[in-house]
Structure formats: C-alpha cells, structure tokens
Amino acid sequence: MKVRSDQFSRLSSEALQDEFLREALARANASFQDARGDAIDSMPDWEELRQQAHEIKNRAIENLPEALEAFEENICSRGGEVHYCEDGAAARDTILSIIRSHDGTSVTKSKSMVTEEIALNDHLEEAGLSVLEGDLGEYIIQLAGEHPSHIIAPAIHKSREEVAELFHEHLGSDPKADIPELTRVAQRTLREAFLGADIGISGANFVVSETGTIVLVENEGNIRMSTTIPRVHIALVGIEKVVPRMEDLALLLRLLCRSATGQRVTSYISFISSARTPAEGDGPEKLHVVFLDAGRSRLWADPEQRAALNCIRCGACLNFCPVYGSVGGHSYGWVYPGPIGSVITPHYVGIEKASQLPQASSLCGRCAEVCPVKIPLPDMLLGLRAKAVEAGSAGLVERFSMRVYSLLARSPRLWRFALACGRPVYKLAARAGLASLLGGPLRRWSRTRSLPLPREQGFRSWWRTEKKRGDADG
Amino acid sequence: MAEKYRDRLFGFLKSRAVGQRGELFTEASRERPSSAPRSGDDLGARFCSELNAVGGEAADLAASADPAAELGSWLQGLGLKTAVIDSDPSWELTGLPMREIVEGAGLELERVDASALPAELSEVDLGITLADAAIAETGTIAQCARPFRPRSISLVPRCHLVLVPRDRLLASLEDLFEGISSGAEWTGGPEGFASYFTWMTGPSRTADIEKTLTIGVHGPARAGAFLLAAEPRDD
C-alpha cells in the first residue's frame, strides 16, 4: 500500500473537518471502550493476566527463530508448504505463483492487515484474478475502492446510507435498505463467491509451534468459508505471530477477544493444522503458509523497540487514543493507525517516510494502560522521536530553541533569571492574545490556542510564604 | 527465491541472540484465572448461561425426563424445511433416535453427496452434529473435522444444532488446550491433532456497519446446543 504517512498533518486536518467521521469515531470508541470495560470487570486478576501475557509474548519473540523452525517442521510434516518472503514484492510474487501453480482464477479473502500491507488485492487483480473480500466491513470498503480505517472495524468511517448507496450501485439492492437487509444482500452475494472460489487467502492471529497450527479469530464465519471451501488455502503471516505452546493461547485468546470487542471469545476460532486428509469430505486440498518479514527482523534486532512485535492486534490502543479518536485511521497514511501504527509504521516503511507519526500523540499513556500485552507505547514513541531527530527531521528553529531550553534547564540560577524576565512578557502576550502576536507560519498553532493569565503571585513565591506560615504555626 | 530468503532470515535471527533463550515447551503450567470455573462447579449451568448470553440457544437436558420431546419442540419452533445429520458413530451412545426426532418435527432429512459437500450443504436449512468437546467458561462448542463430519456442516446451513454429552464438557480454556497437548482422543485421530479444529460460540455476528450488532452473516443465524446425560438412559 502506498505510504502517505509523511502527510499526517494535512490528512488529519482534513479529517477534522469531516463531521460524520468525528461522530462515527466518537460512537465507535465509546462502544469499544464500554464493551472492553464490561468484559474485564468480570476478571478480577486482569492486571496479573496482562503481566503473564506480556511474558508469554516476550518469550515467544526472544525465541523467534526456534519457534518458527518448530512450527515449520510440524506443519510441513503434515503436507503444508512454508515460504519465507523478504518484502511485500516477494510475498506478492510468491502468492501469485502459488495461485498459478494451482490454476486458480478466483480468490476469496478474509480480513487481514498484512495483506493490506503488501497491497495484495491490487496485485492479484492486475494479474487478471477475481478477488473478493469476505468480511462485511472489508467488502464494503473494497466496493468503495478505499482502505480500512480501523484494524478491527475496517468500515467504521462509513454511514449506513453510504453503504446502502454503494450496494445499490454495485449489487442493485434497495437504496433505502436498513442494516439487517444490507447484511443479507452482502451475505447472498458472497455465498456465491465462496462456493465458486478456487483460492482462499487468510491471515493468522497466531501460529503455534507445538502442533504446527494456524489460529484464526473471527465473528462472521467468512474466514471459515475462505479456509474450508476453496481448493487451496494460503495464509499470509507476519513472522512475529508465532507462539510456542497451545497452552499459551488460553490466556492470549482471553485477552485478545476481551480487548478487541469485549467478547469472552469470538463466535468462531479455527485451528488449522493441515489440508483435508484423504478420509475427509471437504476442506482445501493444499495448504500454504507464506511468512512475511518486511521490516520485522530489523525491528526484532532493535532491543529498545522490539516489544512492538508483541502486538496481538486487538485495536484497544486505537479505541482509547484521543488522537485516533479525533482524526481516524486514514490520517495515519498507511495500514496501521493509532499508537501501535505510529510505532510500527516508521519501522516498516522507514522513519524518513513517517517521521510525523511519533509526534501524533499527546503521550497521555492510555494506550500503554489498556494494551493487553503491556507494550510501553509512549516510551517507544519517545524513542522514535529521538530517532527522527537523529535522522534530521528537526528544523533550525526547533534545534535552536531546544538548545536554549537545555542550557536554561541545566542551571537553576539561569532558569530563575529567565523566568523573572519572561513573566512580564508573558503577561503582555496573554492580554494581547496569542494569535495577534504569533503570525506567519506560527498562526497555524496560535489561532486555536489562548494563554491563561498568570496569577499575581508565582508558585515559588507562594511556596515560600506558605512555608514560612507553616513553620510559624508549627 | 523465497527458499533462499529462508536461509538468510534464519542466519540473521540466529546471529543476534536476544534476551533469554530457553527450551520452548518446558515452562510450568499456569494457574487458571479466578473467573474460570473449576471441575467441581456446576459446569452445565455455566455453559448454558454463557452461550445464551451471546445469542446461542442452550439448555441442559441431562436431567430431562424426555429429552427427545424437548428437542422435537425446539426443532419445530425453527420453522425450517430440510436438515442433515452427520454420521457420527457416537449418536448410538446418546440413546437418542435423532432421525425420528427430526422427521417427527416435520423436517425432511437430506442425504448429501460427499463429492459436492459445501455446495449441497449450502442448500440445507439445518446441520445437526455432536460436539467433540465443550467449554463451560465461554459456552463454546469444539469440533474436529472427521471423515463422518465435514468442516462445512456446522457452517453453511442457516442453522446449526449440536448435542453435547455431559462427559464432554470441560471447565476452562486451559482444560481444552491441555487435551490438545496431551493428544486426547477428542482432539483428533491417530495422526494427532485434527487437521481442522473449530470453536463455535453462538451464532455468526457482525457489527461492521455503524457498530450495530447484526446476527447471522456468513455462518448460521441460529445456534442451538443441548447438553445430554453422558450415559444412555434406561427407560
């Protein structure tokens, strides 16, 4: 997918003008937050479980090569084929050549962020294949020619009226159809597609070393369709998805489902270890697993940022982020939005193409509080800001003012002197209004802000008088 | 090309030792969370309340005087025309004359040709199966693909009815995963863990349009699950 993350500031300003989007985001975030809250209220040991999940994922990531090899050995021993791809281009070519080798012409897909990452649909369609998304939200945005704006609810930015209009245009349904009717229309169209498809493509929520198993979590049943009916199942998987043991899943699934949608478990969870055996009546004849690196091994080798690979893609950090909640997923300019997107995008596409993203945070810390595997997202955003400065992202003014600040902050005497000089200037500025003082390029910042008038007595002098009075009383 | 990258990737990963490497599979088992039921609890009641809370239709018929009649009236209430039953040999152990119950409820039983399974099953209204296991903690049904039970029988018909002998009911997710790791009979066949193992918890659902919950998208819109006494009843 084309990277537009260097345009965050423009894209987010545009998003802020979109009233429906802001309403939709407010409604969606409130609903996600309530559902998660209810779900974890029923788990008194939630914090302890988060700590355990954090340890499980750390251990899996620390042992990544061994865990991957064990997975590969087990799934291959039962007829699966495993491929490793360095980047998106290699993965696209590998998948296309698998499809060609099976004479496939029609593909159904389940929702998968990693297939968005490599822009798989465009590539397959250019090669003349028919590709249909099976997830309702993904199907809607495929018809609209757009990209997902949330990793759990991809079409959260679309109103029911827009969906009705889209379905009317593409499928000839009633332009005034309500949500249940729209769902039925999509279901009927996609059922035909599933029954006629030769190739099913999925992602994976986890792959398990111990048994060589792909684990897929969903609510609609479209993943089961795509992995059951077509002749060939191809799973595209980031190398960080591997966990060593089946038992690890008990905890990870509990935390994933509760954090994502507030469910105890989702409607369907599938564990796929091989294509159909000779005695079985249905299921694919061949199973391929395509592992994608595309920046993950580089991130893995960075000890300060490696924890980003622990992410289980629940979306909780998006749902609780005040920045995501205002500007929506498309503003982030690539596949992964929200705090986790601001951390992994610079690693996957290069910091120079995404240096604005680590700035798109107030560092309020809610993302770290809700993350079910305790990824320290604010610390990592700070680390990335430092990297961006090292890469030369800071302008002359920023570098100069930071140098002055650092000089003042290192000397208490200089600091007090600067405050004493600054106080009358600040008062004048606050009375005049910020916007009238800071014009030119600074107006973008100043026009939406006002300065509070300072109290007559500053904190330090207040503290001295209070302390004296306290000493006198005591 | 892809095969060559495998060697480069593993070469790179193995050249950078990170953190604490250890044996992958030897860690001690964890405690179950306090919210998960234990084997002594009333698992039947927990199973039913969890499944009913997410839109499934569950009832415990283990103590019922006439489970066949209760199943029959539920089936009648569906208002459907056609049904298919898997050919699980353990139907016999349940002591339930399932074919008669289904036909007695006015449904026509279809025979499905194995070579065209999903397409033909897609025309049938109701799939009827037995669970390999169930999880009380979450109201979940677990099933392996088996020669007598295709993957799609619980997926493509509009409704799914599953019966659960009480002795197949497990307390928590941990109990199920321990079963898989220790190769319990209900997790597969002679080759080990089943080729395809699926969990079903209530009907198919979506909230993809304006976060509005809608039941029944690709999978069944109605999901019935009934617990049965473990041993056939002597009437």
Image (tube, rainbow, N blue to C red):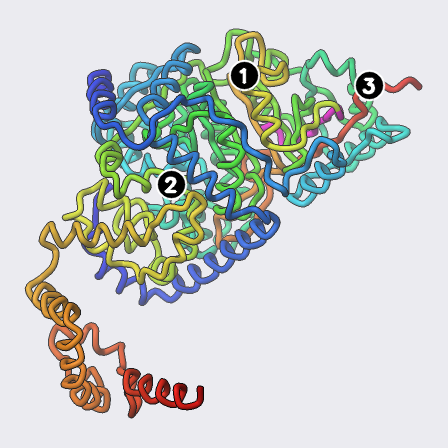
Q: Residue visible at 67% across and 45% down?
A: B53
Front one among B12 and A83: B12
- The amino acid at mark 2 is Cys
Front one among A199 and B231: B231
- Residue B87 rendering spot, x and y as whole percentages: 68, 14
The residue carrying mark 3 is B231
Q: Is the Cβ of the residue at disc 1 closer than 8 Å to that at disc 2?
A: no
Residue B165 sits inside the magenta stretch: yes
Q: Is the Cβ of the residue at disc 3 closer than 8 Å to that at disc 1?
A: no
Residue A24 sits inside the magenta stretch: no
Front one among A43 and A421: A421
Q: Is residue B212 left or right of residue A390?
A: right
Chain of the residue under label 3: B
Residue B157 against residue A366 in the figure, above or below: above
Q: Quadrant of the C terminus of chain B?
A: top right
Looking at the image, is mark 2 or mark 3 nearer the viewer?
Answer: 2
Q: Residues within 10 Å of mark 3 (few under 14, many from 20)?
A: few
Direction right: furthest residue: B235
The residue carrying mark 1 is B194
Residue A230 appears anywhere in the view: no
Q: Are marks 3 and 1 on the same chain?
A: yes
> Which picture quadrant has residue A97?
top left
Q: CA distance from mark 3 to mark 1?
A: 26 Å
Give the numbered dot on residue A160. Answer: none
What residue span does the magenta drawing correspond to?
Answer: B154-166
The residue carrying mark 2 is A311
Instruction: Kindly state the secondary structure of the residue where label 1 is placed.
Output: loop
